[in-house]
Amino acid sequence: MRFIRILLLFLVLLLSIVSISCVDKLIEETETYYETEYRTEETTETYTVTENVVIETKTGREYIRPVVKWAGYNIYGTPDINLVRYYGYRIMPAPHQRIKIKITLAPGALDDNGVFKVYNLTGIGQIPVMPTEVYPHYSYWSPNQIDWFHNFYNITGSAPLLASAITGNISPYYEVSRYIEFDARGVYEFAILADTMYYESVDMVQLYWEDDVVAPQEITRERQVSVQVPVQVEKQRIVQKIIQVPIWELFSGN
């Protein structure tokens, strides 16, 4: 029994010595941690707007007739010239959004070698028929007829050309069409000058119009927007830490 007491006393003394021999030591170590960062990403979102949209298109057509019409030989001063046929038209300004003129040639005119030109005479006026004056002391043209020729060449040389077509076999590479069409917005007067042997070469002229009917409607659209998305980013840092070490470890250099 005495031996056991001595042994216990020895263990107590030994533990006391060991605890006294431990000291604090400051160390550094790497620590992993996470931070929240924000990244910009593009995404698609829908939104609703009210806009005027076309719900119906109204259409119509009108037949128009020439206000000036004449024909003449030798207009260009050559004895073998074709019959020059003039068709002048006038259309009133109309509150239509889109206007188109469609000229239909006579079937017989397609087989004859001819040239058709459509001139914009808005602000210029129609070319009247050539005067039929005859003066014995003039061998060819009267002064009024010469003035008419000057006016004719000035207009056909400067008036804007709206459309043109070639018929017959003048050019094997040219596709002959029975129809001549052009946009008539801003055109209030125009004329067809047909240089062809076929007398009644223009079958009909029609004006086509279109008007859009609009109404407000809700429309769903898409757009790209930038959003901030949170993400967890792994990081590392050096931290200091205090631990208990035996006192002799301080002197060992570990």
Image (cartoon, grey):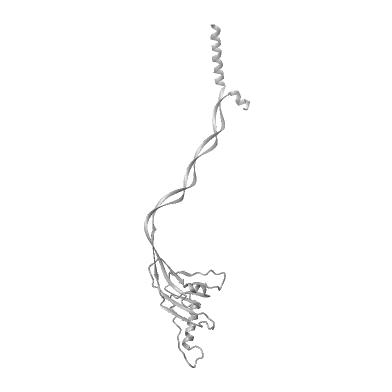
- On screen, residue 225 versus residue 28, left or right, reads left
The foreground one among 198 and 88 is 198
- Determine the residue located farthest toward the top in the rendered image: 1
| Residue 224 position within the rendered picture, expressed as x and y whole percent measured from the top left | 47, 50
The foreground one among 45 and 75 is 75
| Residue 9 position within the rendered picture, expressed as x and y whole percent measured from the top left | 54, 12
- On screen, residue 95 versus residue 195, left or right, reads left
- Determine the residue located farthest toward the left in the rendered image: 215
| Residue 61 position within the rendered picture, expressed as x and y whole percent measured from the top left | 39, 68
With respect to residue 46, does 244 lie above or below?
A: above
Q: How many marks?
A: 0
- Determine the residue located farthest toward the bottom in the rendered image: 137
Residue at point 55%, 15% (across, down): 13
With respect to residue 168, does 143 lie above or below?
A: below
With respect to residue 159, does 48 lie above or below?
A: above
Residue at point 43%, 72% (across, down): 204
The foreground one among 99 and 22 is 99
| Residue 87 position within the rendered picture, expressed as x and y whole percent measured from the top left | 44, 77
Q: In the rendered view of the protein, which quadrant contains the C terminus? A: top right
